[in-house]
Image (cartoon, grey):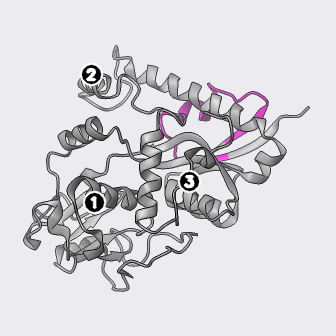
Amino acid sequence: MPDIKINFASGLYDRFLPLYTKEVVPEGIDFEFTPIDDPREIFDRMAGKREFDASEMSGTEYISHVASGNSPFIGIPVFASRVFRHSFIVINRKSGVEKPKDLEGRRVGVQLYTMSAAMWIRGMLQHDHGVDLSTISWVQGAIDGPGSHGSPTVLPLLKQPDVVNNDSDKSLSQMLEDGEIDAILSAMMPESFGRNPDIVRLFPNFREVEADYYRRTKLFPLMHLVVIRRDIYDTNPDVVQTLYDAFCRAKDISLEHMKYTGALRYMLPFLPADLDEIEDVFDGDPWPYGIETNRPTLEAEVQYMVEQHYIAKAMPIEELFAPGVG
């Protein structure tokens, strides 16, 4: 029987690299890895045009489609991207914003209101700092240029927040410098950060804050997961378990590479200290796959999406993934 062909698109992350180099080959699958640096491009090409058989996908976009009852994809509990986002809240010091509650009643820039990074930051601000999100006016657009952030294929929110598109000829970064918005929360740092001394992080000691956040909540925010087209899954259901196993092997290899300190594999001068902290905070596995280990984070993601009007009601986490996998 010929191998099933799977064209997979994702960023070329360390945890996926052994699949790209073919150090790990999924059994019975002709696996073609298409590396694409920009996640938004992957999402737009997958959600809008079904260009790939499987891909990295925005968590909020995927869960919204599952909740609608009409998802063209099925999830695999492999998480391409996860990021603590405290460090991605940037303010203009002249705005008078000094603490999270000061964001109430302000204009805040965001690349895309519905993106996973923005959803997680809002959830953290609400639940960890008591911020009333309903008082904030949102301006969405590209961070470092005028116009929009990609061409997303997203479902409409069930209740529209106070959000407008940036239709000016300025970037959100420039608007922050000019005092037209008070803060930016995003998946990337604006170019004005590091250039303009008034553009600073809301949490300057973000590493300590994020480690404390994880210890208290056990939440490590999930940005992107791996999905496969439902038509492929329906005709070849066993392919999902095979892919999951291959992703797990690839991650294990990458962790071993990272932990080898005879010669540093990555350009991180303080990696040995980082490894000690990873062992202390995450018990040695900073990037777990599977449902149970990630249940607190997945349940928080669904809860935040209900509260922020992406979806009408919470769903069992198992409904997000292929049955019996992970």
- Identify the residue shown where x is 34% and y is 58%: 123
Residue 323 in the image: x percent, y percent? 69, 40
- Who comes first in sequence, dot 3 or dot 2? 2
Residue at mark 3 to residue at mark 2: CA–CA distance: 37 Å
Which residue in the structure is indicated by mark 2? 276
- Identify the residue shown where x is 66% and y is 46%: 8
Which residue in the structure is indicated by mark 1? 126
- Identify the residue shown where x is 32% and y is 57%: 121
Mark 1 lies on a secondary structure that is helix
The image shows residue 247, relative to residue 202, as above or below, that is above
Residue 164 included in the magenta stretch of the image = no
Q: Name the amino acid type tagged 2.
A: Asp
Residue 294 in the image: x percent, y percent? 47, 38
The image shows residue 114, relative to residue 180, as above or below, that is above
Residue 10 included in the magenta stretch of the image = yes
Residue 136 visible at all = no
- Quarter of the picture containing the N terminus is top right
Q: How many marks?
A: 3
Residue 255 visible at all = yes
Q: Name the amino acid type tagged 1.
A: Gln
Q: Quadrant of residue 324?
A: top right
Residue at mark 1 to residue at mark 2: CA–CA distance: 31 Å
Is 279 on the left-hand or right-hand side of 178?
Answer: right
Q: Nearer the viewer, residue 276 or 265?
A: 276
| Residue range corresponding to the magenta coloring | 8-32
Which residue in the structure is indicated by mark 3? 315
Crowding around mark 1 (Cα neighbors within 10 Å: few <14, some 14 to 19, many 20+) is some
- Who comes first in sequence, dot 3 or dot 1? 1
Q: Residue furthest bottom?
A: 168
Residue 287 in the image: x percent, y percent? 44, 33
